[in-house]
Amino acid sequence: MSSTTVGGIASTPGFLSKERIVARAGFNRWLVPPAALAIHLCIGMAYGFSVFWLPLSQAIGISAPVACAPEMSFVARLFTAECDWPISMLSWIYTLFFVFLGCSAAIWGGWLEHAGPRKAGVVSTLCWCGGLLMSALGVYTHQLWLMWLGSGVIGGIGLGLGYISPVSTLIKWFPDKRGMATGMAIMGFGGGAMVGAPLAAALMSHFAGPDGVGVWQSFVVMALIYFVFMLGGALAYRVPPTGWKPEGWSAPQKKAGNAMITHRHVHVSVAWKTPQFALIWLVLCLNVSAGIGILGMASPLLQEVFAGKLLGNDLSFSQLDATQLAQIAAIAAGFTGLLSLFNIGGRFFWASFSDYIGRKNTYFAFFALGVALYALIPNMGHLGNIALFVAAFCIILSMYGGGFATVPAYLADLFGTQMVGAIHGRLLTAWAAAGVLGPVLITYLREYQLEMGVERAAAYDMTLYILAGLLALGFLCNALVRPVADKYFMTDAQLAAEQALGHDKGANGSTVLEWKAAPGSRPLVIAAWLVVGIPLAWGVWVTLQKTAVLFH
């Protein structure tokens, strides 16, 4: 193990330091993606937190909510232990998740590049799991402000650090498969709710009783499970020595087909000032806005557009009785589950595909296909073609997930790999903006059209056309992206200084910069993938069972 010299005295790097996790010759790079997945599968439960809303809304009443006095103020409800919380106040946790994800990723992305993925992963573990424990205390004492602070703020910071912690590392380990590498990790974030939501439901069912709804106990158990998985993932991170490459691989020579890919590096403090950053910010924001609004309204959208057609009759939504409404709600839940599978699969498929056709062309595909599908979907609904309608939204949600997974590699192509994690962190503010723009558009336009007397089956048409327009604008932004100008790149001296700050180990006489994985590492790789693959497979199976009702 290498040592550093402080004041003339040799010292061993700290256990969490970046220097401590520089891989040695023979290390198998396929051990890094499951480490990233272990963290992303845990923090991805943020998508599934709505499973707690209904039980928490009757935490005091148990069988039915105990309503607060109408005159009780919003602030007073944060501190009261006398009445139940409305779902509208609980759902603020979801908003806080993604606000603090974007803020923490933007603020501490540069620190992460210097500190390394292990330290960032450990901090993420403590924040996310500590936030769950604080939320458990909030439920136990019936203090909503503790839940907001625990899961929303502290947990949200853990989300941001955990989300970006593997990005730079994976891109450096897989210079030949940048898209696929980040797609594997970010796929886990999309799959977190698929594993966590049924687990939470099972735990609440186990702990629920006449004296409680079982939420605080479920938070404690999940915090402990997540702590083991996330800490294991963080400690398993390794970084390659600076200049490492897979044996036999050479960086492609710059030519017309890959003119977007640079072999130089832009500093994070400069990258956000470039026109390329602004354009990619808009590209991500517009792509996510179009998908995230639909994701949140998928269930009512299917029910209101097709209504009785889902059951084989021509009744409108307002003509259905309670039994029929329950039946189409179950079918819509299956539709939502199917979309989640395509959201996850799209992250891996599109990001991997981008390694062959290029990142810019991948986004062209997202926007061109998206415009066509959003423009055609209203006609599919009016014609009553459920199969085409469902297929169109599955493709759209695959591209929504693919946009998240492809953008880190797009950034690495444009700005280099040295600070891509920090640059990606700042770009995630586009996600926060899209999280407001998309849902607001689809929700308020729907309400406006219903107030104007538009039938429920047609209430989404204008919204879908507007979303198509957003994607057309995204297409234009993507078309304007050009290679970064020379003036923005770091000089050799600046790069060396940055690498010193990041404790990057460069080449010396004894450093091996090209190797094949040691033959004996294969069993360990298989074991690591099984650890994350089994929970993910279970989540897929549970989701498929729910989705099956859609095809009955």
Image: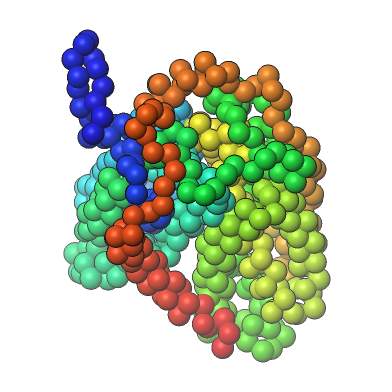
Residue 167 visible, this orientation: no
Give the residue displayed 58% in from the left and 18% down from the top. 491
Q: Position of residue 327 (x, y in %)?
A: 54, 82
Q: Position of residue 511 (x, y in %)?
A: 37, 34
Q: Which residue is at the front of the view, 223 or 174?
A: 174
Rendering colour mode: rainbow
Instruction: Tell whether 318 sits left or right of 22.
Output: right
Give the residue displayed 40% in from the left and 21% down from the top. 501
Question: From the viewer's perspective, is residue 389 above or below residue 68?
Answer: below
Instruction: Tell whether 460 sits left or right of 113.
Output: right
Q: Position of residue 37 (x, y in %)?
A: 40, 55
Q: Quadrant of residue 164?
A: top left
Q: Quadrant of residue 317?
A: bottom right
Question: From the viewer's perspective, is residue 384 above or below residue 158?
Answer: below
Q: Which residue is at the front of the view, 182 or 159?
A: 182
Give the residue displayed 30% in from the left and 64% down from the top. 523
The residue furthest top is 7
> In which quadrant will I find the C terminus?
bottom right
